[in-house]
Amino acid sequence: MLLTRRDLWKLLPVCAFGQNTAPTLFQVACMTLPYAAFPFERALAGIRNAGYRFVAWGTTHVDTTGATRPVLSVNGSPKDALDIASRCRNVGLAPVMMFSGVNFEDASAVDAYKRRIDQANAAGIGQIIVFGKTTAGSYSTVIGNLQLAARHAEGSGTMLVLKQHGGNTATGEMCSRLIADVGHAAVRMCYDAGNVLDYENQDPLPDIQKCWRDVRSFALKDHRNTPKDEDCGIGFGEIDHYKLFAPVMRTGLTMPIAAENIGAPLMPRPRTAEGVDRLARRSREFLETVLTGLGSAIETKEG
């Protein structure tokens, strides 16, 4: 059931909505991840043609020779990152997020994150998605690694955003605990509601009410437990995205919100890039419908 305006107002955290608090500026993006089976350039073309203006870099793509290659390796140079960002901008897409590709429990995490921060700075990317293993442990190592990496990010405009991934980051509430223990403005959260429902079988709606102040972006996927346990594109699953986004509608922040999984439940992955294009467009249209409706409801209430 969709929210009434009265229901919506009950969900909005009072302290987030001061008289001078501006609406959140959402950067609606698609990750290249759904196009992993196709070349990176084809992913960019499909995302742009599906109506997006922003893009988040996935991890790997199959190139024209059939080989799987990273979008940007951890050891890539800042110039490599700038070149890839230029390719995005040349087709009308602004890159806003990228993955670190290294678990934050790893001994190599600090050096890897520093290199990623330098890459992101060169590319003009403001957020690097980080997460750890799906089993909890090494908590003090996680805190230490994130603190050292965060110091490298000081003054750069780039932040490390924790994404729900089981283990130490199973829920938004747990991510907020990590963020508080790190104690640095360069470490915040990329909320992944689908992973909360999938990995933990927990409802993300009460969870985001406990952590929304730390959220700076969303990695968008939905999830179904029935008739089959599987991730899917937003609007195809069991999560009410009107309720999910309600707490962050008036933060005054610029917030990337990137489609990570766009698939349809019970259906095989598209075998053609054109099939992925259709799902990408559908995800954008659903997301924009939700955000526009919420924005209109808030404006009507305040007016």
Image: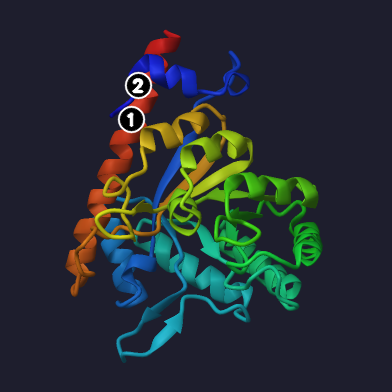
Residue pictured at 21% horizontal, 62% vertical: 266
The N terminus - image quarter: top left
Q: Which of 172 and 46 is in front in this view?
A: 172
Q: Which mark is residue 296?
A: 2
Up/down of 107 relative to 201, above or below:
below
The C terminus - image quarter: top left
Up/down of 16 relative to 262, above or below:
above
> Type of residue at label 2?
Ser
* Residue 186 visible: no
> Type of residue at label 1?
Thr
Mark 2 and mark 1 residues within 8 Å of each other at the beta carbon: yes
Percent x, y for residue 72? 52, 76
Q: Residue 223 carries which label?
A: none
Total tally of numbered discs in the picture: 2
Which class describes the residues within 10 Å of circle 2: few (<14), some (14-19), or many (20+)?
few
Up/down of 95 relative to 3, above or below:
below
Q: Is mark 2 on a helix, strand or loop?
A: helix
C-alpha separation, residue under disc 2 versus residue under disc 1: 6 Å
Q: Residue 292 carries which label?
A: 1
Percent x, y for residue 186? 71, 51
